[in-house]
Image (tube, rainbow, N blue to C red):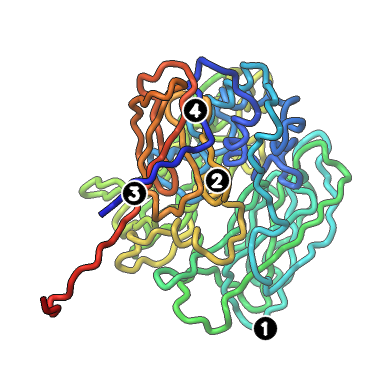
Amino acid sequence: MKKPISLFLSIFITVLGFSQTTYNDIAPALYQNCTSCHRVGGGAPFSMLSYNDISPWASAMETALLNGDMPPWGADTAYIHFVNERPISQADKDTILAWINGGALQGNPALLPPAPVYPQYLLNGTPDTIIQMTTFYSNAGASDTYNTIVVPLALSQSRFIRAIELVPADPSLIHHSIIIADTLGDIPIDTSGFSYSIAGDIAIGAWAPGSMPIVYPNSPQLKMGIEIPANGEIAMQIHTPAGTLGQAINIEFRLYFYPINEPGIRPVYDYVPLQYWENDFWIGAGTIKSFSVEEPALPFDISIFSSFPHSHQICTEILNYAYDTITFDTVPLIKIDKWDFEHQEYYYYQNLVKIPTGYKFHSDHTFDNTALNPDNPNSPPQLISVGLFTDDEMIFDGFQFIVYQPGDELINVDSILKNDPLLNYPVSINEFYTSLESKSYVHPNPLVDKSYIYFNAKQNELKSYSLKICDIKGQFVNMTYEIKDGYFEIYKGRLSPSIYFIKYLMAIKKYRPVKSLYNKR
């Protein structure tokens, strides 16, 4: 039988409309959504790990949140899901805006939840190769620059890359970097500042401040890697922001290889089927235009691992999908409703995406060349045509894939990577608070529509818990809740503005001895 044991938590919920929001209330949302970049060494212009760091930036934060510019995540997660998605929840957004509109109050520092600790390196273990790239001095004065730096790899035989971590001494000096490889001598060094095109046949991935290291799945279900030839080279096309002229850019490059002759590695290939370079690709001043391009799929089935859509500054929307030319069955690939040239990246699918032969890839890009587009490089707007320069435009949508094997589409890449022993990344907010021995937490608090309760309980014990909510008079009230993966989700419902206390009950099993069938009376 089960015997319920009642325990009171030393926390309370405030329903919005009763009290003001302080930095203590928004700190968990900042830790979860922002501090991978907004911290010392994270590349963002200011830290969000303390009240003094963030308070001067409250107005800028409000603008970025209302415009949907932060956190920088472009992909529509209602269309298809990716690993490490960063869209901010409406509850977190509402809590931060309430803090700003309420005067950006500090609150009691003694009640501030502990901040996550970011290690120097986000990958565990010892890399097989550590490259300290030659110091490069920024040539970005009044405008951004692009440069390609190349480093030879002293490999006596071909090797499969398992993971890569790029560690700049100062991440703020690098807007983003595209990482590529090829045989020795095939990628030209270009430090002119105008290295817009990228040579090299082996696309590895991209890096930007706050991004995760590049890690390929390594499990009994799925083992993937990129093959680097013997005596090959690795290169980075580095986008350096304006105003950094003369500053030294130092980058440590940490490579992890699979063991030599490791069995079962499935090679990763790069493929850019969706390109458009036709003469009719131009956008007149003051106009909005859309362009589409299609390309047949490869003559064999493939499993797509990642997507890399690309346009320049006046692009606003991107849509990629594949479809069967006979049945018109459609496979969603990526949908970006607000393209941001300043924050582009590889998007890694939560599950491998099968594209059968006989399908076609399709891409739609929309370009806004009006004065209402804040990202328009020209004021007043000027004619923009296709080209490689930053102020030109292009459609260049690519993918990384492996050759399809039956069952690939059922493989959850996200779960494989989350359990990868190489990763040494700060735990997520729900794991963070449930791991604390003496702290329970409600976030967001005040409660707007729904909030989350984190407390010290093993995840597999949650099903044994139930919640009771009482008001300041000690009377129990009705509140709907759900048990989630490691936390409770509670809903405001019709609760009136006030303070409410949480009580949880844990059912403990008590066992009675059972007589053996062979016992004699």
Circles 4 and 3: CB atoms closer than 8 Å: no
Q: Marks 3 and 1, how far apart in space?
A: 62 Å
381 in relation to 433, above or below:
above
In the image, taking residue 50 as reference, residue 207 lies left or right, namely: left
Q: Give the number of the mark in front: 2 or 3.
A: 3
Q: The residue tagged with tag 1: helix, strand or loop?
A: loop
Q: Nearer the viewer, residue 185 or 233?
A: 233
Mark positioned earlier in the residue sequence (4 or 2): 4
Q: Amino acid at mark 4?
A: Ile
Q: Which residue is mark 3?
A: 507
Task: Tell me the residue at 77%/35% (across/down).
Answer: 143
350 in relation to 134, above or below:
above
Q: Amino acid at mark 1?
A: Ser
Q: Nearer the viewer, residue 183 or 512?
A: 512
Q: Amino acid at mark 3?
A: Ala
Q: Amino acid at mark 2?
A: Tyr
Q: Marks 4 and 1, how far apart in space?
A: 62 Å
Q: Give the number of the mark in front: 4 or 1.
A: 4
Q: The residue tagged with tag 3: helix, strand or loop?
A: strand
Tell me residue 15's x, y (percent): 47, 21
Mark positioned earlier in the residue sequence (2 or 3): 2
Task: Tell me the residue at 73%/55% (across/down).
Answer: 148
Q: Marks 4 and 3, how far apart in space?
A: 24 Å
Q: Give the number of the mark in front: 3 or 1.
A: 3
Mark 4 residue crowding within 10 angstroms, few (<14) / some (14–19) / many (20+)? many
Task: Tell me the residue at 47%/32% (across/down).
Answer: 337
Q: Give the number of the mark in front: 4 or 2.
A: 4
